[in-house]
Amino acid sequence: MDTKNTNQKIVVRIPPSPTGFFHIGRARTALFNYLFAKKVGGEIVFRIEDTDKERSKKEYEEDIIKSLKWLDITYDSGPFRQSERGNVYSKYVKMMLENGTAYLSQETEGQNKEVIRFKNPNKTIIFNDLIRGDISIETKDLEDFVIARNINDPLYHLTVVVDDFEMGVTHVIRGDDGIANTPRQILIAEAIGAPRPVYAHVPLILAADKSKMSARHGAVSLRDFRSAGYLPEAMVNFLALLGFNPGGDRELYSLAELVDVFDLARVQKGGAVFNIEKLDWFNKEYMKLLSEEKRNEEIYNRLKNHGEAEKMSKKAYSIIFEHISKWGDIDTMLGAGEWNYFFERPKYEVSLLSWKNSSLENSKKHLEWIKNTLESSNKESFGSVEKIKSLIFDYATQEGRGDVLWPLRVALSGKEKSPDPFTLLYILGKQESISRIDNALKIL
Ligand code: GLU
């Protein structure tokens, strides 16, 4: 790969604007910078681009820092804040006014009577983008653009170029939307005598409908994904492979393994489509790697937020785990009342107790048999799903499995769909199961 400055230390930057919660597109760009820098033994500068005083908020800055930490994306220096570097920018604005690459301009429109404009040399700029190849742009169309409102109030393009220069940035890896900014920034860099960094513009993340990912597509900030209960390892793995293909069929990579295989040359040019099912798949794979203790702790913490659900037997946890791909699914399932039968007596219509063409009479007969069998069973036989099954299964096979097992399942869960009755018996335990069967017998 062409990294140009071979003797020089490679420096990349992570320069988010704190104007919103950390967007997954920005997170992915940060991740690509991280992977690239680690791969080549370079350094990462972390810079908060808060020149927009109205839209920049401390809350967002904190969220960005927290999000990088969550993903385990570290940096070598920073955070630097542009809002604290006014003197540095003034120095360059002065220099540009002195060397004639900028001038004071009297304005008839807009809020300011006087602004500082860049003296556009009106030329063709060709830059090589590591992902896009050669890009050629006529700067004439940009006219003499404004670089500062006054000597102490620089605008975005100037601050970026000055910072990249002062911080020794060699590689600018950023979103595709930065391409339009590049010619202005190259012109300013030339005017202040800064070397041109190597550019790599990463394709945007697209929603399933191929439009730009935005809030109307649901979760877009890392904060949303954090609270939905995704694991950071899954997020990193998923984001890295969104537009980057290490080659081969392998999909699961830790952050360190991603560093090993990362190559900007393997980042695709076209937009990468965000697929939430794929993220869920990754997440489940990482959930499966957690210890049972950790899983149970996570499940318990989610249940705790739902009052009664806290009472759910630990024996139900493995069923819960089977049915989720992120911890937040527990909130969704509980919110929809899907698992209420695990901790409260079910309510249902009596008609639900009969299987297809079978009669309620039959259901009653079978439930009575089961009740007697369970009552006379010893503690041992409730020790596992298999043991419970062996109490009932032969009878069910003889009498018709649907005829016997359907009413049993309904008596226990009150639902058309739920785990099999043996699993339910095991989770609910002997006493509770018998009293639920009793309830069914009462209404039959
Ligand atoms: N502050 C800019 C953003 O968050 C960074 C653009 C750049 O990388 O130059 O979009």
Image (cartoon, rainbow, N blue to C red):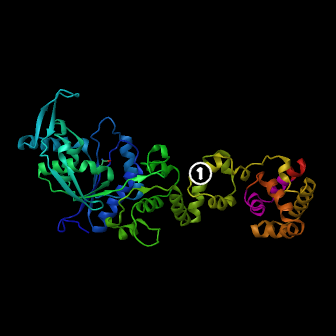
Query: Does the magenta run of residues contain 429?
Result: yes
Q: Is residue 333 visible?
A: yes
Identified by mark 1, the residue type is Arg
Q: Which residues are magenta?
A: 418-437
Left or right side of 131 for 311? right
Query: Farthest residue toward the left?
Result: 99
Of residues 245 and 365, the one nearer the viewer is 245
Q: Residue at x 59, y 51 (%)?
A: 302
Left or right side of 225 for 22? left
Instruction: Tell me where residue 442 appears, x and y as whole percent.
Output: 90, 48
Instruction: Tell me where residue 188 appears, x and y as whole percent.
Output: 16, 47
Instruction: Tell me where residue 119 appears, x and y as whole percent.
Output: 12, 42
Quarter of the image with the N terminus is bottom left
Q: Residue at x 46, y 71 (%)?
A: 250
Instruction: Tell me where residue 276 appears, x and y as whole percent.
Output: 51, 55
Q: Is residue 79 visible?
A: no
Q: Quadrant of residue 244?
A: bottom left
Q: Residue at x 38, y 58 (%)?
A: 270
Give the residue number, with chain letter if any, for mark 1.
302
Of residues 132 and 37, the one nearer the viewer is 132
